[in-house]
Amino acid sequence: NAGVTQTPKFQVLKTGQSMTLQCAQDMNHEYMSWYRQDPGMGLRLIHYSVGAGITDQGEVPNGYNVSRSTTEDFPLRLLSAAPSQTSVYFCASSRRGLYSGNTIYFGEGSWLTVV
Amino acid sequence: DAKTTQPNSMESNEEEPVHLPCNHSTISGTDYIHWYRQLPSQGPEYVIHGLTSNVNNRMASLAIAEDRKSSTLILHRATLRDAAVYYCILRDENTGGFKTIFGAGTRLFVKA
């Protein structure tokens, strides 16, 4: 079972470079989100999406763009990387439903270093 | 969004029970209480969830206070593999719970 797949797993960027972290899920989940986790810290929500064509900001959206053209994919774009964006990035998905206590499924993470 | 409060860290001996507390005094009637854990260098994984009644599964038990303002995750016999960060989060099922906020969690240390 693929679940939530993130690529790349590791990436080193120079300050000012741009890149896209890819996230794909094969569970037909409506909800997808991106979190970042700095060393020794908890998860912080960057952006989330409730369905194709619909995205919204989380706790720390500055410096990141997202789009959701299909149900399966939710890429995260860094337009001009900064050292403060050095972190581990996790993509997550869950299905929609009321009063169902839906489980969130996470990818394995993408380790990004900006030098 | 309702928030949760957890101790930064806890320590346990192997094969002893562990009780991880969580306070959520501003919980709403449609919030489910979820617990996730994050093993080193991995993404978080689901542990258990509940609304009002105590819940049991193969991984853990969840005890929910009668007023729902606090809950406790119970690991019945801690193993070294249970050393992880445990997150207590609230998911508003009335809105689908899509904007889920994680706190810092509780780092559990297990001693052999």
Image (spheres, coloured by chain):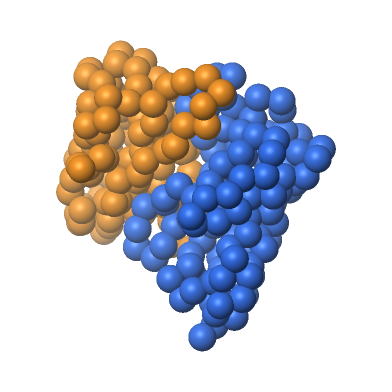
Quadrant position of residue A30:
top left
Q: Please name whichever residue, A79 or A38, is drawn nearer the observer in this view of the structure.
A: A38
- The colour with which the image depicts chain A is orange
Q: Give above or below for A77 relative to A89.
A: above
Q: Residue at x 49, y 57 (%)?
A: B59
Q: Where residue A110 appears, x then y in whole percent? A: 27, 51
The residue that appears at 59% across and 27% down in the rendered structure is: B92
Residue B108 located left or right of residue B54:
left
For this view, does A86 lie left or right of residue A79? right
**Can residue B62 be seen in the rendering of this structure?**
yes
Q: Is residue A98 above or below residue A93?
A: above
Which quarter shows the C terminus of chain A?
Answer: bottom left
- x, y percent for residue A107: 30, 46
Q: Decide which of A35, B39 is in the foreground and name it.
A: B39
Q: Position of residue A113 (x, y in %)?
A: 27, 57
Which quarter of the rendering shows the N terminus of chain A? Answer: top left
Chain that the image shows in blue: B
Q: Residue at x 20, y 56 (%)?
A: A10
Residue B104 found in image quarter: bottom right
